[in-house]
Amino acid sequence: VFSLEDYENLAALKSGSLLSLPIELALAAGGELQAIPNARRAAESFAIGYQICDDLDDVQKDLSRCSPQPAINVVAVMQASNASGDARALAGKLALRHLGLLLPRQSGQLLHRLALDLGVHISLASV
């Protein structure tokens, strides 16, 4: 059984580094080395929030997929872990929490705008 922690680790590893690298390089070039760990955490958190948002859009397709290897979807992970409450709503709240992390010194304005856009998307999908 895939736990929520496993899911978050996989999502962070899948895209977090790709999102973090250009920000880390810009911070390093600007002499802001102390900000790099925060930028990495923020990018990983954004990656988790983005993956949850993507899973919410694909939940029906992923859950109805007939394959020996089922899709790893956050809703299925939450249902399998017996999360109390509506798994879709809980996933939306989790995504919004992850998308709420900001990058240091406005170094990630584009990611911030994308996080806000995804937050609106999640809110509209939850209605």
Image (tube, rainbow, N blue to C red):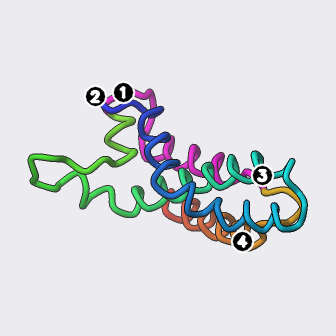
Element carrying mark 1: loop
Residue at (82%, 62%) from the top-left corner? 27
Q: Which residues are magenta?
A: 80-102
Name the side, left or right, on which 69 lies relative to 116: left
Marks 2 and 3, how far apart in space?
A: 34 Å
Image spot of residue 99 (x, y percent): 65, 54
Q: Amino acid at mark 2?
A: Val
Question: Which mark is nearer the camera, 2 or 3?
Answer: 3
Marks 4 and 3, how far apart in space?
A: 20 Å
Question: Dot 3: few (<14), some (14–19), or many (≥20) neighbours within 10 Å?
Answer: many
Q: Which secondary structure dominates the residues rendered in magenta?
A: helix
- Mark 1 touches mark 2? (CB < 8 Å): yes
Q: Which residue is mark 2?
A: 1
Q: Which residue is mark 4?
A: 113
Q: Amino acid at mark 3?
A: Ile
Name the side, left or right, on which 121 lies relative to 102: left
Q: Which residue is mark 1?
A: 81
Marks 4 and 1, how far apart in space?
A: 32 Å
- Mark 4 touches mark 1? (CB < 8 Å): no
